Image: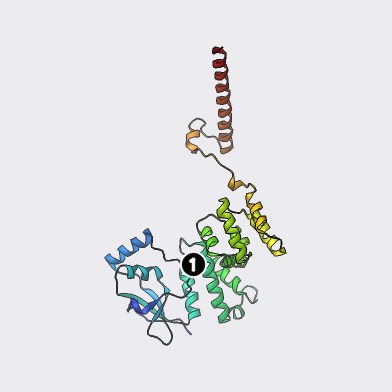
Amino acid sequence: MANKKLKAPVNIPVEKIRPFEGHPYKVLDNEEMNTLIESIQEQGILSPIHLRPIENTDEYEVISGHRRLHAAVKAGIKEVPAFIFAVSRDEAAIMLVDSNLHREHILPSEKAFALKLKMDAMSRQGQRTDLTSTQVGRKLETAEIIGEQINESKNQVRRYIRLTYLIPELLDMMDEGKIAFSVGVELSFLDEQTQYDLLHVIEEQECTPSYSQAWHMHRDFNSGTLTVEGIENMLMSEKPNQRQMFKLPLEQVQKFYPNANKQQLENYVMKACEYYNKALQRQRNRNSRDAR
């Protein structure tokens, strides 16, 4: 079906509009959403949302504008301006992903499920067999096509899609920056029960796995030797991100040692501590002699 759009936006009742089922982007009631609600209350929706007609109904599905629609409902708006696209659901899925992938802020989980949604839609359309590279005249696989469109390698596209195999709790930890992307990819190869076993250990020990630990878990899981005890032993071993660190604002030290680099400042602080410790020891010795 061709991407046919009405030339001008039309007003559609919000009760006739449905979110795109399975869309990957989070619509959160936060400060940013409150700002959007206030803007819509004052000025209305300045940029029409994009919809597609749902087959055999008088309703519509959102392609682009889930946040604007949510804010409009919260603001008490009864109708929203919209462009209507006469497209199939797979075409709409691709449009939905493409309209959001280049946002300034996109969570790892959102990008993962967005790329999977697009990959599935393109595969169903048969695009992995009917597109060729102009450079070498060869067929491109779907991951490679998507990668070229978003400036990523096909392997990086596959890594993102691997994240969709993580349990929600581990995905949330990735979105919060508690687990690195590379760690999440390795953990995605564990089955659901093993991931929940890992989550329990993470919560008990209040630490997260390093890349090396996640890689070893992936390896041991594949060989059938990974146990809960093995996970516990791995996470109990000290790693750099678990060591206690003492931090001091750089400018506080630089005023005593201007133009020094980081290593020089660290050495300066350590020598100062050693000097002060020796001075305290001399004072304790003097006090001890005076007390005799």
Q: Quadrant location of the C terminus?
A: top right
Q: Residues within 10 Å of mark 1 (few under 14, many from 20)?
A: some
The image shows residue 244, relative to residue 118, as above or below, that is above
Q: What residue appears at the point 66 percent right and 52 percent down from the top-left corner? A: 233
> Eyeballing the image, is 15 above or below 220?
below
Q: Nearer the viewer, residue 277 or 270?
A: 277
Local SS, label 1: loop
In the picture, measured across the screen, residue 46 lies left or right of residue 21, that is left
Q: Indicate the amino acid at tag 1.
A: Leu
Left or right: 195 in relation to 252:
right
Q: Residue furthest left?
A: 42
Q: What residue do we see at 59% from left, 55% from top? A: 201
In the picture, residue 71 is in which quadrant?
bottom left
Using the image, determine if residue 101 lies above or below residue 56.
above
Q: Residue at x 55, y 41 (%)?
A: 245
Q: In the rendered image, which residue does mark 1 sit on?
A: 101
Q: Name the spot of residue 11 as percent of width and height, x first.
A: 31, 78
Instruction: Name the colour scheme.
Output: rainbow
